[in-house]
C-alpha cells in the first residue's frame, strides 16, 4: 500500500538506535589542505628586512573557517620571525604589544627557492574575519626578504582567501622605528611567496540551507518534492534518511554558483502534498518517526529528548521541510480557498 510508509511499525528501541546514527554533522571531519596553496606574484623588485600585510577569509561558500599553517619566503633570511595581530596591521606597525609571535627560527640563505616557515599554531579565520601578518628577518643588511612594489591592492585571491598588499620594513629590529634612510617603513609593497592554508567546510543541514550553492539547494528541493509523490521510489524514504544523505554529499558536485539561476525564471511551485497515510507517523510534510530537534540546531549533535514520537519533534521536521520546499503557510492557502469559494 503506497499510502503506508516503510518502517511505520518500527519499535521504539529501533527508533532510538536510528536516532543515534542519523545525526547531521555541522562541519567536515577533516581540514582540507592539499588544494589550497596560494602563490603571490614575484617580480623581484626589492629585498629588505620585513613585510607587513593582511590576510582575510572572504567567501560566499559554506566555509566554517580556514586555518593558515605556514608562509614561504626567499632571500638571505637568517633569524626569521612571524607575528600576527587580529583585524589588520594598519596603525599597529610600531606597537609590538599588539602582536603575537607565532614563529622563530634561523634559516640559511635561499635566494631562489622558497623556504617554509611553519607556524607554531595555525591561525584561524572565519568568513568575514581578517588578520595582520608580519614576516621579519633580523639579518643585518638589506637582503633578508624579497618583496614587490604594489601593483594592486589585492596580491592574491581565490574563492575563500585573500592576500592584501602591505608595507615593507627596513629595520633589522622587529618593529624598529629607524632604518637606513630615516623612517623604516615603505607603504604600497606586496608580499612575495606562498601561504598554505586549510578549509573546514560546513556540512549541509536545513538550518544552513541558504548558505549553500544554488545547484545543491535545488537538488535538495527536487529530492524532497519527489519524496512527496506516491509514484516515486523516494516516497518510501523517511525525511531523516533524505536529510542525512544530503548532509554527507559533497555539495560542489552541483556547481558553486550562489545566486539565482541565469534564466531569471521563478522557482517552480511545490507539488501538492501527498495525502495522509494510515501510518501514525506520517504527515503531508514531515513523514517522520524519529525526528529530533538536533536536525535543525546550529551545532548538530544528539538530542537529549525522547524518541520521535514527540509531536513537537515531528512538527519541527515538518516545518523545516516545508520551508525547504517553499510551500506557503496553511493560513495563506485557507485564505485563498475562501476567496475562491466566495467567487
Image (spheres, helix red, strand yellow):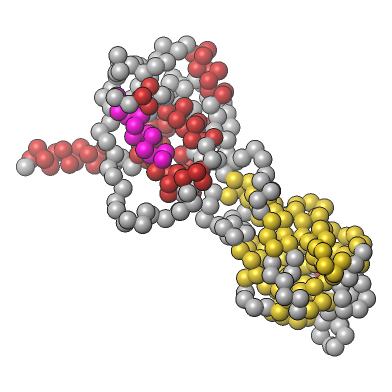
Q: Residue at x 62, y 74 (%)?
A: 153
Task: Quarter of the image for the C terminus: give it.
Answer: top left
Q: Is residue 235 above or below residue 222?
A: above
How far from the left and from the top, in percent, is residue 104?
88, 60
Q: At 89% from the left edge and 70% from the top edge, which residue is drawn? A: 76
Q: Residue at x 57, y 29 (%)?
A: 302
Q: Is residue 222 left or right of residue 160?
A: left
Residue 201 shows up from this direction: yes
Q: Please say whether residue 229 is one of the residues in the magenta stretch.
A: yes
Farthest left residue in view = 343
Q: Nearer the viewer, residue 76 or 259?
A: 76
- Placement of 159 over or under 199, stated as above or below: below
Q: Which residues are magenta?
A: 219-230
Seen in the picture, residue 292 relative to 95 is either above or below; the reply is above
Residue 216 image position (x, y, % from top left): 45, 44
Q: Is residue 80 magenta?
A: no
Q: Is residue 202 left or right of residue 84?
A: left
The residue sitting at the front extreme is 112
Residue 48 x %, y %: 83, 77
Q: Quadrant of residue 135?
A: bottom right
**Where does the N terminus fall, quadrant-wise?**
top left
Q: Which is more toward the observer, 221 or 41? A: 41
Compared with 69, 222 (above or below) is above
Q: Residue at x 28, y 31 (%)?
A: 273
**Residue 128 can be seen, yes or no:** no
- The secondary structure that dominates the magenta segment is helix
Q: How many marks?
A: 0
- Displayed quadrant of residue 260: bottom left
Q: Nearer the viewer, residue 182 or 236?
A: 236
- Where in the figure is residue 329, as x and y percent of width and height? 29, 40
Amino acid at each position: 500500500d503506497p499510502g503506508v510508509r516503510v518502517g511505520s511499525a518500527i519499535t521504539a528501541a529501533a527508533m532510538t538506535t536510528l536516532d543515534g546514527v542519523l545525526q547531521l554533522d555541522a562541519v567536515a571531519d577533516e581540514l582540507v589542505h592539499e588544494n589550497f596553496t596560494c602563490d603571490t606574484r614575484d617580480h623581484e623588485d626589492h629585498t629588505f628586512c620585513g613585510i607587513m600585510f593582511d590576510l582575510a577569509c572572504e567567501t560566499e561558500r559554506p566555509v566554517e573557517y580556514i586555518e593558515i599553517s605556514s608562509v614561504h619566503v626567499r632571500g638571505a633570511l637568517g633569524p626569521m620571525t612571524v607575528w600576527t595581530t587580529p583585524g589588520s596591521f594598519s596603525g599597529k606597525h610600531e606597537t609590538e604589544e599588539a602582536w603575537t609571535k607565532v614563529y622563530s627560527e634561523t634559516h640559511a640563505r635561499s635566494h631562489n627557492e622558497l623556504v617554509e616557515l611553519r607556524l607554531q599554531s595555525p591561525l584561524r579565520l572565519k568568513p568575514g574575519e581578517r588578520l595582520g601578518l608580519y614576516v621579519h628577518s633580523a639579518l643585518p643588511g638589506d637582503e633578508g626578504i624579497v618583496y614587490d612594489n604594489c601593483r594592486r591592492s589585492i596580491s592574491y585571491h581565490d574563492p575563500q582567501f585573500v592576500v592584501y598588499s602591505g608595507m615593507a620594513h627596513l629595520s633589522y629590529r622587529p618593529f624598529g622605528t629607524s632604518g637606513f634612510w630615516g623612517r623604516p617603513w615603505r607603504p604600497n609593497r606586496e608580499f612575495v611567496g606562498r601561504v598554505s592554508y586549510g578549509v573546514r567546510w560546513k556540512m549541509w543541514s536545513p538550518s544552513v540551507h541558504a548558505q549553500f550553492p544554488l545547484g545543491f539547494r535545488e537538488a535538495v528541493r527536487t529530492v524532497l518534492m519527489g519524496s512527496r509523490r506516491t509514484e516515486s521510489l523516494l516516497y518510501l524514504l523517511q525525511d531523516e534518511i533524505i536529510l542525512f544523505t544530503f548532509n554527507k554529499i559533497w555539495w560542489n558536485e552541483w556547481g558553486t554558483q550562489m545566486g539565482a539561476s541565469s534564466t531569471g525564471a521563478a522557482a517552480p511551485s511545490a507539488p501538492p502534498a501527498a495525502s495522509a497515510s494510515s501510518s501514525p507517523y506520517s504527515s503531508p510534510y514531515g513523514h517522520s518517526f524519529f525526528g529530533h530537534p538536533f536536525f535543525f540546531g546550529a551545532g548538530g549533535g544528539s538530542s537529549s529528548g525522547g524518541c520521535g514520537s514527540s509531536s513537537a519533534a515531528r512538527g519541527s521536521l515538518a516545518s523545516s521541510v516545508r520551508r525547504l520546499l517553499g510551500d506557503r503557510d496553511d493560513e495563506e492557502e485557507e485564505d485563498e480557498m475562501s476567496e475562491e469559494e466566495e467567487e
